[in-house]
Image (cartoon, helix red, strand yellow):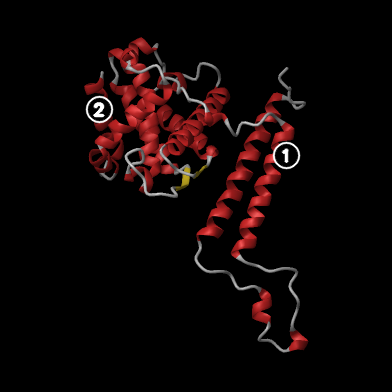
Amino acid sequence: MKRKSPLPHHLSRDISQIGLALRDCARQIRYAARNVPGSIKSDESISQWMPVSQRIKPPGQLSLDSVAHFADDLIETAETFAGHALPSLQDHWKVPVALEPLTGYLRVSGGYAKTLRIFSMGYYAAAKRMIIQSGASDVLIFEYLIGAAFERTSALLSVSETVQHLEPASDWNRSPHTLIRACAQLALSLIDSQPIRSTRFDTLPDTNAPWWLITEPNPYVFLTLSVSSLAKDLCPAGLDTEPDAVLRFFADVIGAREAAFRKALKGSDPLLALTAEIEHVVTHLC
């Protein structure tokens, strides 16, 4: 029998987000400590040049190693606390992640909080699985930044009246430009938020990990996820039914159009240019 959390559902969600934030912060401390060359001098090494009468013995050595160990302890504590509070969600990226069609997120049919949670978890899991399967040994992704990007997108689209009075998906298919523009806005918000903070490849990448993924994982990954979700609305019949195969296909498409996408992102009007580029891609695929 599945163990039920003793906490109310809304508190479990809050604790889950707190646990994720704690682990993300601790990992950021750990990566920062391990990526800084050299070591930090401790108070003891400084005090050896002082007169004996003025020396104060520090409580412990202060070094990059000790900071990294502290971060590891904080991660372990956060995971233990979260594990006792509610079932662990850490391994949900280890199974194929089927993203929802883009209209499923934008229409908010199940309530905004639920949609936000499904979007954040789905994009987090899909991004992590995509990077790990490309050969990375470790990756740091801030899930709450994915949620923040979705909230910012929703606000921008509401202001521009792009998604007000949403019609069924079939009507979107007859006039897809509005949905493509919403996809471009979502991709830009995700890229600007930079949820993927670091990736580590222990060996040189092969064809499974293009250099754009290594150097700029946020645009490569979130363009892939956003266009994959869009395609489920615009050309569902032509997609593979296996989630990993869908992401691999669109990762190849985004990689093949890397120069055009880079140019669009760096243009004077990124939203307009990215909308045109995504429209070019889906027009040829659908």
Q: Looking at the picture, which amino acid does disc 1 mark?
A: Phe
Instruction: Assess disc 2: are there few (<14), some (14-19) or many (≥20) residues with their C-alpha within 10 Å of its C-alpha.
Output: some
Residue at the image point whose x is 58% and y is 54% from the top: 30
Residue 211 tag number: none
Q: Earlier in the sequence, mark 1 or mark 2?
A: 1
Residue at the image point whose x is 46% and y is 38% from the top: 132
In the picture, residue 185 is in which quadrant? top left
Q: Would residue 102 be seen by someone viewing this image from the given angle?
A: yes
Residue 281 tag number: 2
Residue at the image point whose x is 52% and y is 26% from the top: 95
80 relative position to 216: left or right: right
Cα gap from disc 1 to disc 2, whole angstroms: 45 Å
243 relative position to 6: left or right: left
Decide: is 199 above or below 235. below
| Image quarter of the C terminus | top left
Q: Nearer the viewer, residue 178 or 161?
A: 178
14 relative position to 278: left or right: right
SS for callout 1: helix
Residue at the image point whose x is 38% and y is 13% from the top: 169
Q: Looking at the picture, which amino acid does disc 2 mark?
A: Val
Pinpoint residue 128: horizontal percent, then vertical percent: 48, 36
| Image quarter of the N terminus | top right
Q: Nearer the viewer, residue 152 or 77?
A: 77
SS for callout 2: helix
Pinpoint residue 159: horizontal percent, then vertical percent: 41, 30
Q: Would residue 161 be seen by someone viewing this image from the given angle?
A: no
Residue 81 tag number: 1
